[in-house]
Amino acid sequence: MAGVRTGGTPEVQLLTISTDAGSVTGWFRLLFDSSFYTNYIPADAEEAEVKTALEQLAKVRQVEVSRSTVLGGFSWAITFSTNVGDLPALVVDSTKLVQSGTLTVTVADGNNAVDQYGDVLCTVCRVGERPVQYGYKDIEDIDVLQTLVTGLHAGTTYHFSMSSFNEKGWGVRALATPGTITPPLQVPGTPTSVVASVKSWLASPGDNLPIPSGCC
C-alpha cells in the first residue's frame, strides 16, 4: 500500500525470467508507464545493460540494478532511485525469449503481497512512497537560474534537489546546498489596530439571554 514518509522511499521491483528445463536464451524488452519499449535486452543481461536500457526511456530517471541467478535464468532487482512515489509495474515483452521447458516471466511490482501463510512473496521488493509534503516545479526556460518556493511551514525541514532533462533522458539528481532548510519558528509580533468598544443593544428572546421581569 502506497503512502508518504519523511524523505520518501524509492520503489524496488523484481523482474524474473526462468524456465524449469535448461536455460532461457534470446531477448526481451521492457515498457514503463505507457512509454516506448526499451531496446532488446539479452536474456542473460548484466546489471549495467538493464540499467542503460531503462534509463533511455523518457519516463525513467535513475535506476540501480542488482542481478541474481534463479532456476534456468535470472532475476533483476530494479531500484527506481529518483522516480517518486508508488510506480506502475514494468511490462515485459517476452516474445523473443527461447527455452526448452516452461517459461516463467514475472514482475513483482514493489508490493507487499503475502502467501497463504502470511510470508512476504518478494523480500527485496518495496512500494515507493512520496516524501511528506512533496512538490516539484518544471522550469523550461534555460536562462532561469532560480525559483521562489512559497507556502513553507515554520519548523518543518525541507530538502531541495534539481535534475535536468533533454531528449536523451534524465540526468543525475543534484542536492541543493545546504542540504536542508528549516524556516524558523518565530515569536508572534505585536497586534496592531486593536480597538475596544461597548456594544449597545436591546435584549430580545432571540438572544437567549434572561429578560428581566416586566421588561419590554
Image (cartoon, helix red, strand yellow):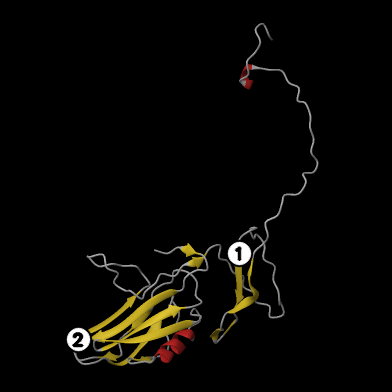
The x, y position of residue 208, in whole percent, is 61, 20
Judge from the rendering whether residue 41 lies leftward or rightward of residue 148; answer left or right. Answer: left
**What kind of residue is marked 1?**
Thr
- Residue 27 locus on image (x, y percent): 33, 91
The residue tagged with tag 2: helix, strand or loop?
A: loop
Among the 4 quarters of the image, the one containing residue 200: top right
- Indicate the position of residue 159 as horizontal and vertical percent values: 60, 69
Looking at the figure, which quarter contains the N terminus?
A: bottom left
Residue at the disc numbered 2: 20
Is residue 214 visible in the rendered image? The answer is: yes
Which mark identifies residue 5? none
For the residue carrying disc 1, how many other residues have a C-alpha within 10 Å: few (<14), some (14-19), or many (20+)?
Answer: few
Q: Mark 1 or mark 2, which has the lower sequence index? A: 2
Q: Is residue 58 left or right of residue 174?
A: left
- The answer to whether 56 is drawn above or below residue 82 in the figure is below
Classify the position of the C terminus by image quarter: top right
Asked whether, in this view, residue 124 is left or right of residue 135, the answer is: left
Image location of residue 177, percent across then percent down: 66, 76
Q: Which image quadrant for residue 92?
A: bottom left
The residue sitting at 75% across, 25% down in the picture is 199
**The disc label shown at residue 157, or none:** 1
Q: Residue at x 67, y 66 (%)?
A: 149
Task: Report how far apart the C-alphas of labels 1 and 2 lie in the structure.
Answer: 52 Å
The residue shown at (68%, 78%) is 141
Q: Looking at the image, is mark 1 or mark 2 nearer the viewer? A: 1
Residue in the image at 80% along x and 35% along y: 195
- Can residue 37 be spotted in the picture? no
The disc labelled 2 sits on which kind of residue?
Answer: Asp
Towards the viewer: 146 or 197: 197
